[in-house]
Image: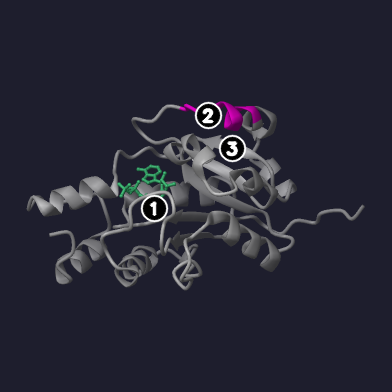
Amino acid sequence: MTDFIPARAIGILGGTFDPIHYGHLRPCLDLLQQLNLAEVRLMPNHIPPHRATPGSSSAHRLAMAQLAVSQCNELNVDTRELNRTTPSYTIDTLIELAAENPHTPVCFLIGLDSLNSLHRWHRWQELLSYCHLVVSYRPNYELTLAPEVRKIFEQVQTTDVEDLQQQKQGRILLWPSTQLEISATRIRQLIEHQQNPQYLLPDNVLSYIHKHNLYK
Ligand code: ATP
């Protein structure tokens, strides 16, 4: 058996980011620092399989994500899902990432709402063969797992962040990162109703939204 000699883990946060906001960004930075990750990549979906197609184009969502990370060296944007013409299945992305980084644990970051619906993800049983799942609490969401997910969760849950660096994949960590009651839906609604969403998202992203007349 070959020993696994790990490189520092990376974090990935997938999402529609329509638009990106501080509820995405602050947990990423918390996790980067508290889990000692080498970097966190924000990965905008092209055609999200689990939800309605985003209102804004891929180009706008990408531009906003790039603006949001422009002032933080350890946060980057990974465009691979936007370059596909097929649905953005997380499992395909994780297989690709694992092949590119054979010694690097990948921490796939999700909010608690996403863990609760994990059983609806395409080939969800295989995800932990390619990554760890790191789950941030989100205001107004309780842990309510489907029985088939709960069974696996109880076997692989850890509270030790070291496990995520020592092992290549297969663990789930629930992590109390900063909880911000912000959603993209709310930001879109505010703009639609001519209200100001300032302080829920970066100023440069808000300027971009105004410049391109989004969410009106
Ligand atoms: P929408 O309101 O349009 O559904 P959203 O704000 O939930 O969007 P997404 O792009 O769907 O944003 O989210 C991407 C990922 O970020 C998901 O895993 C989601 O759980 C997580 N997330 C989004 N907002 C928060 C938040 N405020 N706190 C913690 N996690 C969040």
Report the span colored magenta: 143-151
Q: CB of mark 1 within 8 Å of CB of mark 2?
A: no
- Marks 3/1: CA–CA distance: 19 Å
Question: For the point 39% across and 53% down, which residue is it?
Answer: 25
Q: Amino acid at mark 1?
A: Leu
Q: Which residue is mark 1?
A: 25
Q: For the residues carrying marks 3 and 2, which lies nearer the camera in this image?
A: 2
- Marks 1/2: CA–CA distance: 28 Å
Instruction: Please determine whether, in this image, residue 79 is positioned above or below residue 206.
Output: below
Front residue of 139/162: it is 139
Q: Which residue is mark 2?
A: 146
Q: Amino acid at mark 2?
A: Ala
The reply, left or right, for residue 125 in relation to residue 207 is right
Q: For the residues carrying marks 3 and 1, which lies nearer the camera in this image?
A: 3
Question: For the point 67% across and 57% down, which residue is it?
Answer: 8
| Observer able to see residue 38 | no
Callout 2: 10 Å neighbours few (<14), some, many (20+)?
some
Give the x, y percent position of residue 200: 25, 49
Mark nearer the N terminus (3 vs 2): 2
Q: Which residue is mark 3?
A: 173
Mark nearer the N terminus (1 vs 2): 1
Give the x, y percent position of residue 212: 18, 71
Q: Amino acid at mark 3?
A: Leu
